[in-house]
Image (tube, rainbow, N blue to C red):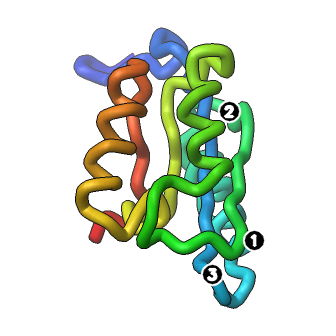
Amino acid sequence: MRTGAKDKSAAPMRRYAIYVRTAAGGDGGAEKQLAALRAAITARGDGKIACEYVDTNVSGAGGPGPRLQALIEELPALAVTVVAVTGLGRLSRSQRTLTEVLAAIEERGVRILVLEPR
């Protein structure tokens, strides 16, 4: 082993929860989001996908969608370490609601992976 090289086997494996949302009247892009997240997590090679939550035809302008709310409530029982989304806008389009959602996830000791931070 090279000096300074990290031993990946020593790092604990992460458990990922995937969350995707398509907008009301959206084009059905849930499968595209799921595929991108699955590929990114696989490429990272540091964990496994524990569950997937999908809100279809749910506006991001209001409060959290029903599946996002369920994910947040179920995080302790799921024992996931990371919630993965394609972009922060998938969690909410409202800055206030986004802040609340991020806080609720982080309060449960779960990190957030955002593929396209914008």
Q: Nearer the viewer, residue 100 or 113?
A: 100
* Residue on which disc 3 sits: 24
Q: CA distance from mark 1 to mark 3?
A: 16 Å
Residue at left 58%, top 25%? 75
Q: Residue 57 appears at what percent x and percent y?
A: 68, 75
Residue type (three-letter) at the residue carrying disc 2: Lys
Which of the marked residues, 1 or 2, is nearer the chain's N terminus?
A: 1
Residue neighbourhood size for the residue with mark 3, other residues' Cα within 10 Å, grouped as few (<14), some (14–19), many (≥20) = few
Residue 115 in sight in this render = no
Residue at left 65%, top 86%? 26
Which of the marked residues, 1 or 3, is nearer the chain's N terminus?
A: 3
Residue type (three-letter) at the residue carrying disc 1: Glu
Q: Nearer the viewer, residue 19 or 70?
A: 70
Q: Residue 68 appears at what percent x and percent y?
A: 58, 47
Quadrant of the snapshot with the C terminus: bottom left
* Residue on which disc 1 sits: 31
Q: Nearer the viewer, mark 1 or mark 2?
A: 1
Q: CA distance from mark 3 to mark 2?
A: 30 Å
> Do the numbered discs 1 and 3 sit on residues whose CB atoms are within 8 Å?
no
Q: Residue 94 appears at what percent x and percent y?
A: 32, 66
Quadrant of the snapshot with the N terminus: top left
The circle on residue 13 is none
Q: Residue 4 appears at what percent x and percent y?
A: 24, 20
In the displayed structure, 38 sits above or below 93; it is above
Residue neighbourhood size for the residue with mark 1, other residues' Cα within 10 Å, grouped as few (<14), some (14–19), many (≥20) = few
Residue at left 46%, top 15%? 11
Q: Nearer the viewer, mark 3 or mark 2?
A: 3
The circle on residue 48 is 2
Q: SS class of the residue under badge 3?
A: loop
Residue type (three-letter) at the residue carrying disc 3: Ala
Q: Nearer the viewer, residue 63 or 26?
A: 63
